[in-house]
Amino acid sequence: MKVDEKRDFLRKNYLGEWLKTRQMVEDKISNNICVCGKLATGFHERCCRKFHKKVDAETIKLMEHLLLNPKGVSNE
Ligand SMILES: [Zn+2]
């Protein structure tokens, strides 16, 4: 699965967890200096592609176990 596919999968199937985890990661990564090296204001972070990419990657890492065990797929 590509990163985009993982992100789409998690957003589609676990939207609540996705948003919660992503917010947590965002708070954690958010700093005075953005991951791209620019001064990080709330406005900049909302618009910064590098910042979002990093947040997505970290969020996926934390939720990776859900990818292996999709909701609605049972052994019945
Ligand atoms: Zn940035």
Image (cartoon, rainbow, N blue to C red):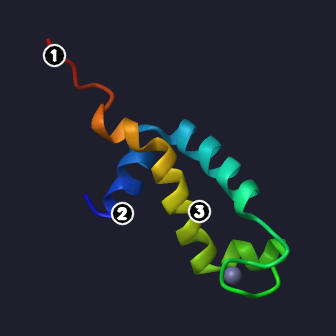
The residue pinned by badge 3 equals 55
Is the CB of the residue bearing disc 1 within 8 angstroms of ligand 1?
no
Determine the residue positioned at 76% across, 65% down: 30
Residues under labels 1 and 2: Cα distance? 27 Å
Q: Please provide percent x and percent y for residue 18.
A: 54, 44
Drawn side of residue 16 relative to residue 6, left or right: right
Horizontal side of 41 relative to 69 (left or right) equals: right
Q: Quadrant of residue 52?
A: bottom right
Question: Which of the pair 76/60 is nearer the observer?
Answer: 60
**70 lies above or below 4:** above
Query: Mark 2 or mark 1, which is nearer the start of the sequence?
Result: 2
Q: Residues within 10 Å of mark 2 (few under 14, many from 20)?
A: few
Q: Secondary structure at mark 3?
A: helix
Residue at 53% across / 70% down in the picture? 53
Q: Quadrant of residue 47?
A: bottom right
Q: Which mark is residue 3?
A: 2
Task: Name the N-terminal-most of marks 1 and 3.
Answer: 3
Pick out the residue farthest to the bottom. Answer: 38
The quadrant of the rendering that contains the N terminus is bottom left
Image disc number at residue 75: 1
Nearer to us in this view, 39 or 20: 39
Residue at (45% x, 48% y) in the render = 11
- Amino acid type, mark 3: Val
Tell me the distance, in whole angstroms, between the alpha carbons under discs 1 and 3.
Answer: 33 Å
Type of residue at label 1? Asn
Q: Is residue 26 above or below residue 62?
A: below
In the rendered structure, the answer to whether residue 76 lies left or right of residue 73 reads left
* Label 2 C-beta lies within 8 Å of the nearest ligand 1 atom: no
CB atoms at circles 1 and 3 under 8 Å apart?
A: no
Residue 3 sits in quarter: bottom left
